Image (cartoon, coloured by chain):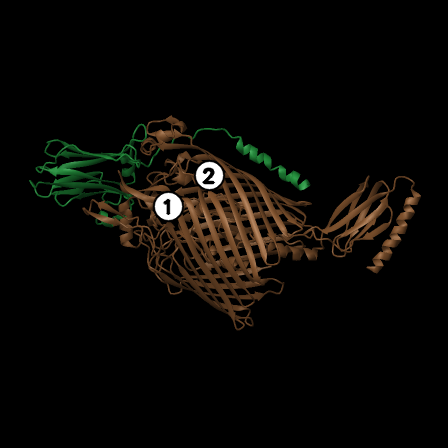
């Protein structure tokens, strides 16, 4: 029976562990999520600004992202483009663009115009290896005055192969991919 | 006998004499029964001497004797038996007294008893598959899953090369209970990419009970129970142990393991064991699988007292590893997976390296056990307390701080159990027990990633009883029943949009603690009352020829991921949603086994049917657009399912030194209502082995193994058409179609030497995938991204002392 007396000494362990306090867990700051991508196109001829935005208020939750395009793109001018990524799940909203620029060698934004859209994109910002990043870019009509309609697909890829010859072979993981319905007038 | 009688007569005269001396009340009888402490059999010819009176008697065939007409008072009795240790007891005689005395066998006898008890089966009415120490030694650089695969009807579900979890009769994860040294392993076994935290070098024997019969360990083993044990310590003054080193070509690494045991004839012992493993990137025949290396170190220690009638021991084990996950297997969207499947090979292939980069897992599992037992009149009583801490960190490719895990779970479990084993005269045995368990899961919020598994506390209580009886030499019947109560108290943040989309705001308004706008804090509480039972029989046709029949009912409560999943599972690029309204799933399993064994051959035919009501599984229901693109949306469902199959194993020795073995197994699983096949059912497989032994050449053994895995032709079609904007078309996300069949050849040889100091060496050479075939396996979760391992040459040297 002596053995059992010793063994019973273990029981207090159980009680200690059961008596801990009942704190409710703290909420998590979801750092990784991107809720908002805003692509701003500023016309070089001063004719105005086109804003394309996608906003997913609950991240991967069931609410679908809302995609908006402020207006048509002019075929008479080229545009300076810039992209802003936000995480609005955090309060105040966190600017993810800074992180993307900081880790430029691990990121790249890809632009794909669908076949009916006479637009071409040129990278303006580059990473430390002089390879394209794409948060700053220029979009211009392929030939001045050409019109059409279709989609511009903007894709942010994390850890693509760099250099690469386009999205299809770049590998990596897609962080954001949105297609905007636009017309070129 | 005649001499005994005379002797008794003389003693009788002597006792008459004593009564006349003392005139006090001297008419008490002292009856004594001497039995074997180990198995309770009566001991004939045991001599009992009353020291004070200098009288002695000898037990009869029933182990009994009687001293008549003794006076009141204190007496010292000396009990001796030629096969046993001497024993002295004192007795205060106040009335007629019956005393049962247990004698312990001499130490040399104990050894044999130990051997017998070590071969005991965990279930009597169910055929058990076992893996011996020899096989374990041959596989010492592997993991548990790979070793279990040597058993017919057991396969593995893999995530890459080293993460592998056992699948028994088509079922895995929470449907399998893993017992490590009497302790139920609590290591977040629900996840497909969570391999069991157990070092095979710390185990001497593994048995697999298919079909949920080990009610002693749990009632929720719908698939089966895996029992890993260490052998009992020898009751003699000895030092023994072993050192094994292992190198292999694929992964360019190896393992080193050692164990050391010191035992004493007085029962005290201690032993320790340690393992180190280190591997670099594994390779397919064509390319390196970047970031698949791992490092593992394990340690265990045990010490205590082990006597036949009582014992106490303390056991501690640490399992820890750091494991790279194939760099290219981290996909983000449906389009990433489409691209990966189309490419067939990983998109990141670098030169061989030992680096373990991100993504990776870091796991540690601590187990502390305290166990004591003692034999009483009514049987053997065992008390066990154990404490486990499982810590899991998963590091993912992420922006910003990469040293921070994306998943950090800490699971602590305490349990206390009492078990009783009793033997009765009529060839029957009773096992019964009661246990309680407390478990706490803590997901660290500092990860900055939504918790996959919420904070919860779980309280379990269970009680069971198993009874078996042998009627004559042919029939044995075993039956058992178990009740499990579980209370789960969880705190979970739901995304408010999901909470409402699933109608939980109307179904479970009472569990809302606080609405924080974007998120809703809830406090789900569940009670589960589960009954499980088992009835089995063994019929012995002839010596070595048995039929086993078993019917068992098991009940499993839903696991945390089935209840609470909510969100993106990165490694499978799908959104997974659990369901708070699940109830327990109940499996009805019937198994029938025929076994024939003689000196030359061994045949086992095993068949089973498992009808699982409210089977919980996950199916794709839709596509869900998010800002990152489109994801398949999978939901856990509860439907009735059926699984059935059979496996055959035949081994035969031809001539003197030639051996051939054959194994085949087939499993089918369907949803009962619509006949849709279940996902991840192991395909049929056929294994053949021939080997030749040269006893004169240091027991040189050479063998060739062939393994043919058929293509799985029955699978659910969970494919989706996904719009690919850059291609302006729809493409098929084909995650369902199984890869083709494959055939592998393995070569194995071993040779043994005796060293001068009594130790022995063994050298093992093993070549797997001899022809360096390029293939994919249906049960590897990473098959979309990579092929399987190419040729692997493994050399191991072990020294036993």
For the question of whether residue B60 can be seen, the reply is yes
* Image position of B501 with respect to B607: above or below: above
| Residue hosting label 2 | B410
- In which image quadrant can residue B29 be found? top right
Horizontal and vertical percent for residue B782? 35, 51
* Image position of B135 with respect to B396: above or below: below
Quarter of the N terminus of chain B within the rendering = bottom right
Q: Residue at x 88, y 51 (%)?
A: B12
Chain A shown in which color?
A: green
**Which numbered disc, 2 or 1, marks the residue that appears first in the sequence?**
1
Horizontal and vertical percent for residue B187? 47, 43
* Image position of B122 with respect to A124: above or below: below
Horizontal and vertical percent for residue A26? 41, 30
Q: Residue at x 49, y 56 (%)?
A: B592
| Residue hosting label 1 | B359
Which chain is displayed in brown in the rendered image?
A: B
């Amino acid at each position: 029976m002596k053995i059992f007396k010793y063994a019973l000494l273990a029981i207090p362990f159980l009680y200690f562990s059961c008596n801990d306090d009942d704190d409710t867990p703290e909420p998590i700051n979801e750092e990784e999520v991107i809720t908002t991508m805003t692509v701003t196109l500023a016309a070089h001829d001063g004719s105005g600004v086109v804003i394309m935005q996608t906003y997913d208020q609950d991240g991967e939750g069931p609410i679908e992202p809302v995609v908006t395009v402020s207006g048509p793109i002019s075929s008479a001018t080229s545009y300076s483009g810039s992209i802003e990524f936000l995480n609005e799940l955090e309060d105040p909203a966190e600017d993810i663009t800074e992180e993307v620029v900081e880790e430029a060698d691990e990121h790249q934004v890809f632009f794909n115009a669908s076949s009916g859209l006479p637009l071409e994109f040129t990278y303006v910002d580059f990473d430390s290896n002089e390879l394209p990043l794409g948060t700053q870019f220029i979009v211009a009509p392929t030939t001045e005055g050409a019109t059409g309609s279709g989609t511009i697909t903007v894709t942010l890829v994390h850890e693509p192969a760099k250099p690469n010859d386009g999205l299809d072979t770049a590998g990596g993981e897609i962080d954001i991919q949105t297609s905007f319905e636009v017309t070129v007038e | 006998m005649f001499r005994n009688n005379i002797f008794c007569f003389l003693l009788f005269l002597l006792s008459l004499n004593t009564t006349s001396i003392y005139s006090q009340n001297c008419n008490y009888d002292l009856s004594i029964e001497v039995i074997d402490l180990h198995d309770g059999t009566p001991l004939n010819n045991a001599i009992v001497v009353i020291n004070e009176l200098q009288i002695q008697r000898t037990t009869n065939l029933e182990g009994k004797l009687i001293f008549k007409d003794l006076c009141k008072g204190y007496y010292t009795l000396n009990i001796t038996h030629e096969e046993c240790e001497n024993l002295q007891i004192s007795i205060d005689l106040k009335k007629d007294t019956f005393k049962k005395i247990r004698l312990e066998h001499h130490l040399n006898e104990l050894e044999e008893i130990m051997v017998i008890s070590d071969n005991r089966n965990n279930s009597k009415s169910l055929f058990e598959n076992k893996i011996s120490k020899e096989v374990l030694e041959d596989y010492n650089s592997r993991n548990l899953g790979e070793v279990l695969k040597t058993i017919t009807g057991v396969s593995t579900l893999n995530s890459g090369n080293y993460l592998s979890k056992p699948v028994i009769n088509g079922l895995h994860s929470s449907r399998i209970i893993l017992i490590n040294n009497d302790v139920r392993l609590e290591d977040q076994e629900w996840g497909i990419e969570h391999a069991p935290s157990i070092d095979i070098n710390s185990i001497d024997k593994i048995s697999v009970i298919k079909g949920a019969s080990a009610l002693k360990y749990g009632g929720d083993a719908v698939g089966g129970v895996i029992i890993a044990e260490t052998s009992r310590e020898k009751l003699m003054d000895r030092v023994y142990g072993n050192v094994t080193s292992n190198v292999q070509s694929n992964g360019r690494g190896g393992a080193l393991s050692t164990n050391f045991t010191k035992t004493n004839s007085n029962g005290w012992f201690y032993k320790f064991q340690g393992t180190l493993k280190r591997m670099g990137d594994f390779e397919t025949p064509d390319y390196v699988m970047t970031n698949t290396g791992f490092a593992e170190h394990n340690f265990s220690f045990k010490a205590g007292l082990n006597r036949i009638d009582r014992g106490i021991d303390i056991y501690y084990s640490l399992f820890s590893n750091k494991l790279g996950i194939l760099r290219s297997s981290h996909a983000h969207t449906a389009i990433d997976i489409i691209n990966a499947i189309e490419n067939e090979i990983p998109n990141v292939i670098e030169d061989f390296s030992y680096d373990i980069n991100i993504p990776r897992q870091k796991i540690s599992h601590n187990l502390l056990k305290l166990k004591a037992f003692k034999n009483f009149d009514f049987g053997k009583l065992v008390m066990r307390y154990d404490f486990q801490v499982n810590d899991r960190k998963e590091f993912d490719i992420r922006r910003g701080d990469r040293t921070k895990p994306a998943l950090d779970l800490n699971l602590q479990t305490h349990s206390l159990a009492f078990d009783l084993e009793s033997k009765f005269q009529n060839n029957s045995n009773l096992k019964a027990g009661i246990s309680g368990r407390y478990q706490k899961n803590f997901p660290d919020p500092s990860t900055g990633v939504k918790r996959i598994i919420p904070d919860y506390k779980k309280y379990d209580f269970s009680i069971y009883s198993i009874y078996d009886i042998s009627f004559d030499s042919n029939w044995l019947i075993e039956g058992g029943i178990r009740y499990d109560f579980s209370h789960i108290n969880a705190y979970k943040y739901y995304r408010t949009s999901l909470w409402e989309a699933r109608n939980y705001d109307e179904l479970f308004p009472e569990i809302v603690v606080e609405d924080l706008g974007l998120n809703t804090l809830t406090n789900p509480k569940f009670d589960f009352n589960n009954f499980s039972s088992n009835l089995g029989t063994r019929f012995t046709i002839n010596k070595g020829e048995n039929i086993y029949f078993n019917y068992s009912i098991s009940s499993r409560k839903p696991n945390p991921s089935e209840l609470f999943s909510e969100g993106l599972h990165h490694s499978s690029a799908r959104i997974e949603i659990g369901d708070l309204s699940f109830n327990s799933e109940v499996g009805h399993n019937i198994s029938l086994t025929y076994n024939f064994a003689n000196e030359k051959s061994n045949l086992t035919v095993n068949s089973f049917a498992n009808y699982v009501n409210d089977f919980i599984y996950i199916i794709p229901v839709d596509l869900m657009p998010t800002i990152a693109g489109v994801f398949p949306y999978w939901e856990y469902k509860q439907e009735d399912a059926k699984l059935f199959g059979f496996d055959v194993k035949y081994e035969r020795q031809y001539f003197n030194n030639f051996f051939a073995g054959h194994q085949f197994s087939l499993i089918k699983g369907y949803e009962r209502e619509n006949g849709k096949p279940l996902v991840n059912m192991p395909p049929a497989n056929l294994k053949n082995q021939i080997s030749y032994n040269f006893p004169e050449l240091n027991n040189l053994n050479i063998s060739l193994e062939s393994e043919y895995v058929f293509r799985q032709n029955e699978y659910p079609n969970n494919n989706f058409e996904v719009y690919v904007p850059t291609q302006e078309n729809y493409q098929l996300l084909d995650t369902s179609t199984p890869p083709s069949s494959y055939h592998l050849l393995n070569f194995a040889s071993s040779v043994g030497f005796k060293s001068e100091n009594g130790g022995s060496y063994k050298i093992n050479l093993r070549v797997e995938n001899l022809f360096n075939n390029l293939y994919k396996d249906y049960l590897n979760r990473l098959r979309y991204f990579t092929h399987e391992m190419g040729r692997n040459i493994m050399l191991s040297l072990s020294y036993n002392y």
